[in-house]
Amino acid sequence: MSKQQPTVGVISLGCPKATVDTERILTQLRTEGYQLTNSYEDADTVIVNTCGFIDSAVQESLDTIGEALAENGKVIVTGCLGAKSDVITQVHPKVLAVSGPAAYAEVVQAVHDVIAPPKHNPFIDLVPPQGIKLTPKHYAYLKISEGCNHRCTFCIIPSMRGDLVSRPVSDVLAEAKRLKEAGVRELLVVSQDTAAYGVDVKYKTEFAEGRPTKTSMVGLSEALGELGGVGEFWVRLHYVYPYPNVEEVIPLMAQGKILPYLDMPLQHANPRVLKAMKRPGNVDKTLERIKKWREQVPNLTIRSTFIVGFPGETEDEFQDLLDFLEAAQLDRVGCFQYSPVDGATANEIAEPVPDDVKQDRWERFMETQQRISANKMQAKVGQIMQVLVDEIDEQGAIARSMADAPEIDGLVFIEDGFHLQPGEFVTVEIVAADEYDLWAKPIAEFTESKDTSFIELG
């Protein structure tokens, strides 16, 4: 371990919201003079930010904590699984501290208890205005709220993160501006429920960046759109609950203010199952809305996630879901087998669906969506589009289109794109496609990439 400067290691698991929490903790520690590392050996203590959403995530978190204890010995646990501290301490009683999600002060204090912060040196302990980021230099997650007011029966997030609390819109926009000035080219707006942003403060209007701005998804999207528009600065909305106010952001997409991309978890398509989930259940209306949105924004990408094998789901109800996929022709789709996570009220609703039936339905779901996706991707061959370069490898450049969020969607492979730089916008022609990814050749570059100055870990 480091004998010169107090050093902290970090492992961040789970969703982008957890990533933002980790970034905030690391920014505070770096401001206090701690060094950061990705190495167990070099760390005086290790922070594990956990996920507890489904059983597989719980097991991954427990396994990661065990590995950190074996490799380092001084482990501080935080995050969603930390809200159930007994689950952690029963398996790993030697952890030094356990705290729930967004417990920034508790985590920093736990680090202090292990090793005191060094004497601050303002000439050495430099932290960029945008803070420490775990993402590449050219994109960043922008968390706008914490918690959720819904009580979906399959979900335990409200018990871990509480009811919705919106960040002041002035703070959100100030952070967005700092990120852009630091060289970020894409902002990914995240929360538990983006469409509900501002409901807890009655959508109040406040001055942000010199202009009155409403604390709402629409007001925030309008303001973010003023930072440059999709030609030079991408704004991507995630976790948008299907409220009526979604209609209000569609024109911003049509105007090129924000990306024509809508991440809207629908979860199922059978009315009885949706009611049991405590989710909106008017499937016909959902299809009508999707049709209307696509008429306004022909290049709109709709991403969604679904659950198969929900307790009591019948074969006919599952078929309704497959029929919905065929009718909706969604662009990007994820599917999960129902996980009876401890504390979910859905566990008591009906008899569980057998595991082999859940697996069969998941495979049939994915086969259906894969065929839909393959047809949609093939239709893009010959198109000219703007992409954002993520990295360069031995075969060329790897980029993403407006339709592709990092880590969860497809990629655009630019052969012989060695001259390109990560964070650069490029115009390409699509020359080939498979079920999820595209291959392209460059036509012209939109902009030159900017030199950025993030602090790297490691």
Image (cartoon, rainbow, N blue to C red):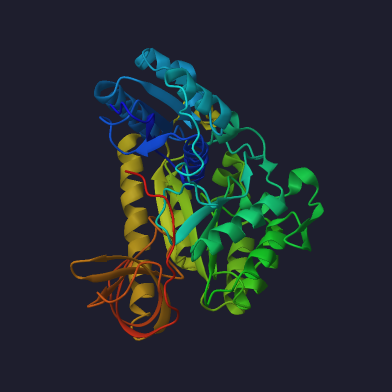
Q: Whole-percent x and y of residue 18? A: 48, 40
Residue at 50% x, 27% y: name it.
Answer: 107
Q: Whole-percent x and y of residue 325? A: 45, 62
Is 205 drawn above or below residue 231 in the view shown?
A: above
Residue at 64% x, 62% y: name it.
Answer: 285
Is 292 drawn above or below residue 243 in the view shown?
A: below
Q: How many labels does the image show?
A: 0
| Occupied quadrant, residue 34 | top left
Q: In terms of depth relative to the viewer, which is nearer, 106 or 121?
A: 121
Q: In terms of depth relative to the viewer, which is nearer, 196 or 417?
A: 417
Q: In terms of depth relative to the viewer, which is nearer, 156 or 278?
A: 156
Q: Quadrant of the N terminus?
A: top left
| Occupied quadrant, residue 374 | bottom left
Residue at 73% x, 49% y: name it.
Answer: 198
Q: In which quarter of the image is the C terminus?
A: top left
| Occupied quadrant, residue 151 | top right
Residue at 54% x, 51% y: name it.
Answer: 270
Q: For residue 103, say whether it is visible.
A: no
Is 252 drawn above or below residue 146 in the view shown?
A: below
Q: Whole-percent x and y of residue 339? A: 42, 35
